[in-house]
Amino acid sequence: MQPRVPADVRYHSLDTWRGIGCLILVAYHSTFYCDPVFRLTQPSTWTVAGFPLMFLRMLWVGVPIFAVVSGYCIAASIESPRCKPHSLSNYVVRRARCIYPPLWAACGLAIVFTFAVSLIPGALEHTKQLPRIASMPYSSWFGNFTASELWLSPLFSTEPNYLSKNTRTLVYEEQYYILAGFMLAISPKWFFGSTAELSVSVLFVRQVGLGLGLPLTVSINF
């Protein structure tokens, strides 16, 4: 008698952690344009408004939480189809459908909102966080709609221009997808072993690069 296969193999706890990570990041991003500063070592900075802001700015920990859970989910999504025909094409289609339609919708909303603000006399000049759509180069439009503006702008020697600044972090998830797809293409039967070897190689190159003083880090200023 064969063991009964559960009807639902989804880890619902991961959905909970992803939801927690998203909410933490929403709260963290809400502090980007707030000025009050609260330092525990400087009583002169202690204010009623500064304390919650200090706490909210510690919620950057949602980034590694969300990244780790997303990385696991990406690898888990490859486990079942990786040895089946057309596994790579199915993977690419599913990942593109996961990222790009929501990204394009967010870009569209940012354009509409910015245009609406520009109709108010003098409003756009006092909202520096909004994009300057009229002056954005074609490369930035491509970078925004492909979530590649973070690394594409240096290639064109231009400053990054974002329709929505929070989308810049999508480049890391996009890199997860690209690397996972590459490993799926070259070694589907040894996917997890190859992924472990790649991780060890990256850590080795990072440590050697840091020891040699090579610029291996990217600074993201929100």
Image (cartoon, rainbow, N blue to C red):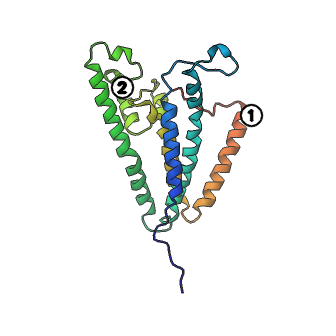
* Residue 91, horizontal then vertical, whole percent: 44, 57
- 55 relative to 113 in the view: left or right: right
Observer-nearest residue: 55 or 31? 55
Q: Which mark is residue 211?
A: 1
Q: In this view, does 42 lie to the left or right of 178?
A: right
Q: Dot 2 lies on which element?
A: loop
In terms of sequence position, does the residue under pointer 2 or pointer 1 come before the other? 2
Q: In this view, does 27 lie to the left or right of 109?
A: right
* Image quadrant where residue 138 sits: top left
**Which residue is at a point 28% across and 25% down the rendered structure image?**
115
What is the total number of numbered labels drawn onto the structure image?
A: 2
Residue type highlighted by circle 1: Gly
- Secondary structure type for disc 1: helix
Q: State the residue at coordinates (59%, 63%).
A: 190
> Hey, which quadrant is residue 145 in on the image?
top left
Q: Which residue lies furthest to the right in this view?
A: 211
Query: Crowdedness of circle 1 by 10 Å Cα count: few (<14), some, many (20+)?
Result: few
Amino acid residing under circle 2:
Pro
Residue 85 appears at what percent x and percent y?
Answer: 43, 68
Alpha carbon of mark 2 to alpha carbon of mark 1: how far?
A: 38 Å
| Quadrant location of the N terminus in the rendered image | bottom right
Q: Name the residue under label 2.
A: 137
Residue found at x 73% / y 32%: 212
Residue 24 vs 8, above or below: the answer is: above
Q: Do the residues labelled 2 and 1 touch (CB within 8 Å)?
A: no
Q: Nearer the viewer, residue 122 or 82?
A: 122
What percent of the width, then of the height, locates residue 67?
55, 45
